[in-house]
Amino acid sequence: MYILMNLDAYLTEIISGFTIAIILIPEAISFAAILGLPPTVGLHSTMIVSLITSIFGGCPTLISGTNATVTTSLIGVSQLLGPEYLFLAVIMGGIIQILIGFSGIYRLFYYLSKPVTNGFLLALGTIIGLSQLSNFKDMKTGELFSKNEIFNTLFFSLVSILIIQYGLLFLHLNKFLDKNIHIPGGLFSIGIFYLFFNFFPYKISIKTIKDKGEVNTTIPKFKLPDVKWTTENILKTLPYAIAMAIAGMTESIFMMKETSEILKIDTYGFRESLAQGTANILSGLAGGIGGCVLEGKSRANLENGAKTRVSSIATSLFFIFITLFMADTIELLPIPAVVGIMLITAYKTSKLENLFKKIDSNWIIMVITAIIGVSTDNLALAIVIGSIIHKGVKILYPKY
């Protein structure tokens, strides 16, 4: 019985890894699109970041890849100097994260106040949600809800959300096979939508991943960014690299703390800093946009029953395999399945319930932090300003 229980646990971890790997594919493509880059850039970034951090990271169940935290930090440099300088910023951001590790600065991220952290998450979830608006725009005119297929996307996105939320109830295998294996609703949603839109006799007009760009099945190639290596250009890029490093470490350390409390295990911020920094350096050298721990996906991994590094390594390996050998299938994934997953991720990340708590100084700091993050697309700036305000309130009003 003991062996069977262990087999069940490993199978649970592998299924969770497979599910999250599939979900990561449209997410990686979506965040590359936000920066105006082809899908392959996002896929290569997640390949590199997820593999390195899953093996060498400081917490066993964390899932890493491209995400809103890093993407929003890089929007400015891409617009100001061009995509090659974006890759330079990713490399510099990785170097800064390694320095954060060796200097011990990573310890400061453990002491970010709760209202600032909640504001950060609220901003992050809001940015993820708003990023999905592009899926409801006409690709030529840019108008919202201008064609039937856009309404189809909206309707089926709502259906996707329902499947994701309640699909687990129908696929919990211990009801049938007496095995405690979780098959999440996200996987159910992707499977149902893929079969429905590609094999249903009556064709429904709907967007697919292919509409965001062609998915190329290539292995990342490493080279230095094609930039002018001047002091001026490096200094222009540096603020974005710092913002990326700070925002990425904030989300990563936050999820490490939460995982440590849930699983009752030790986690290692120093190790995570080095792994994440190295991953981002290699991602930038491969022409990628880097990444960090994905708070929503890491929490979903825990909810799926994952407890060891098997799940995160499985996620990475499945992601690499699917990306390299199943590009044609990826391109046929319907957008509504993607939108549903992303909106659920946004909701779980933002922790909206915090908005409905008692209005006090902490609530105000949380909201201010979130507003700064959303309005500036700079989560690092939101963290810094939110922390300064919180410290000021504590000094002026100790009782609060």
Image: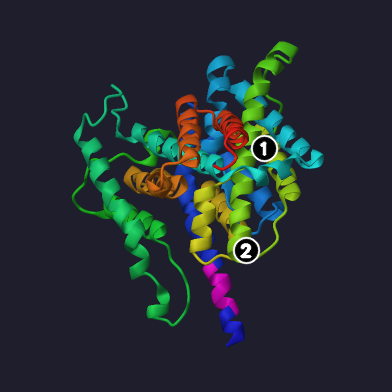
The colour scheme used here is rainbow
Q: Under tag 1, what secondary structure? A: helix
- Percent x, y for residue 173? 41, 75
Q: Which residue is identified by label 2? A: 310
Does residue 87 appear in the picture of this structure? no
Amino acid type, callout 2: Val
Which labelled disc corresponds to residue 280?
1
Q: Is residue 80 above or below residue 149?
A: above
Q: Is residue 263 above or below residue 397?
A: below
Residue 234 lies within the magenta run = no
Q: Is residue 332 above or below residue 238?
A: below
Residue nearer the viewer, 52 or 331: 52
Quadrant assignment for the C terminus:
top right
Number of numbered labels in the structure image = 2
Residue 10 lies within the magenta run = yes
Residue nearer the viewer, 398 or 77: 398
Quadrant assignment for the N terminus:
bottom right
What residue sits 47% from the left and 52% below the top? Answer: 22
What residue sits 37% from the left and 35% below the top? Answer: 211
Q: What is the magenta segment's predominant secondary structure?
A: helix
What stretch of residues is rendered in magenta? 6-12
Q: Label 1 neighbourhood size at 10 Å, few (<14), some (14-19), many (20+)?
A: many
Residue nearer the viewer, 139 or 157: 157
